[in-house]
Image (cartoon, coloured by chain):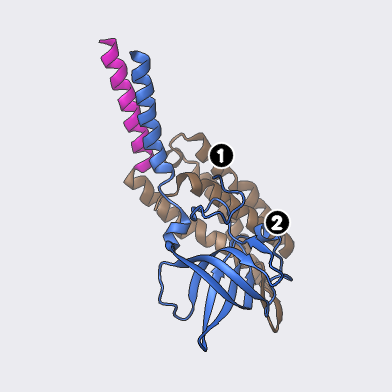
Chain colours: A blue, B brown
Amino acid sequence: MINLIYKISAIISFSILSLNISSHHAFTAEFDANAPINITGKVLKVEWINPHAWVHVEVEEKGKKTTWMVEGGTPNTLIRNGINKESIKPGTVIVVRGYQSKGKLCLPRCIANGRDVTFPDGRKVFMGSSGTGAPRDGADPRERR
Amino acid sequence: MNLLRDLLICISLAFLSFNSFSGEEHDHDMHDLMAHLLTPASEKIWESTGFVITEEGEFSLEPTDQEGWDEVIFGAQVIIESSYLLTRPERSLGRQDWIAFSNLLQPIGKRAFEAAENKDAELLFKVGADLYQACVACHNVYMTE
């Protein structure tokens, strides 16, 4: 009986602890997991900086141009995944899947968290960071399923 | 009677673990330390390295004068000292992993300091990536919304 009570108490303690551990993530503070994006456009600018690289993409739809600023992982993470300054240089047409920021006014530009990028040769690469709390959408090959 | 005592001890421990991770005062204190000390110091490192790549070319963000490098030295020193501030008993609450995460900042800050003193932008870029990984490791466990 005592063992049972200890087990129940341990489960309660662990559950309470787990709530605190998993209650936050930076992704949810800034991006909307319910607002997936899938954009195709030309790279205008790359900010190869820590803690996140940013890729500025010009998307043209029905004659209207919109600039998206897409957040990626750290430059080191991108290099490990096969993205470098050469592969994503300005002028390259890419397809980006990700999630839009919570603010959706797109003024002066739209902002998104990038999950994966597809290059003109068809190569699709994860462009985010692991463990940031982004949805488990299959984009990150390291995420536990 | 022993059964009741054991049950009370277990429930008390459960609530103690809950309160030690969710104290409002502790959260405010940590928010202030992060927002007004550690984040600005980290940004001195991150914003002083990397590249902006446009169709016009690639532009380095590294400081161009001693004043710029002094800003990085200041940020590095604050990161080193923040390690001590984070491990104070009222902040660590005796959590060994918290202390271990906080201690990661010392060698990172020292390497950033060294990179700035030697005006070594390449090293500073690597240190910036390590700094972010240290931040994420701790935030994944302890950061709350």
Q: Residues within 10 Å of mark 2 (few under 14, many from 20)?
A: few
What chain does mark 2 sit on?
A
Q: Is residue B26 left or right of residue B122?
A: left
Give the quadrant of residue A43: bottom right
Pick the front one: B23 or B15? B15
**Residue B25 location in percent, x, y?**
33, 47
Q: Give the residue number, with chain letter if any, for mark 2.
A: A80
Give the quadrant of residue B55: bottom right
Quarter of the figure with the C terminus of chain A: top right
The kind of residue on which mark 1 rests is Ala
Is residue B119 visible in this depiction of the protein?
A: no
Please provide the residue range marked out in magenta. Answer: B1-22
**Residue A16 location in percent, x, y?**
36, 36
Q: Residues within 10 Å of mark 1 (few under 14, many from 20)?
A: some
Is A135 rendered above or below residue B12? below
Q: Give the residue number, with chain letter if any, for mark 1.
A: B100
In the image, which disc is placed on residue B52? Answer: none
**Residue B31 location in percent, x, y?**
41, 54
**Residue B102 location in percent, x, y?**
54, 44
Numbered disc in front, either 2 or 1: 2
Pick the front one: B16 or A145? A145
The Cα atoms of the two marked residues, 2 and 1, are separated by 26 Å
What chain does mark 1 sit on?
B
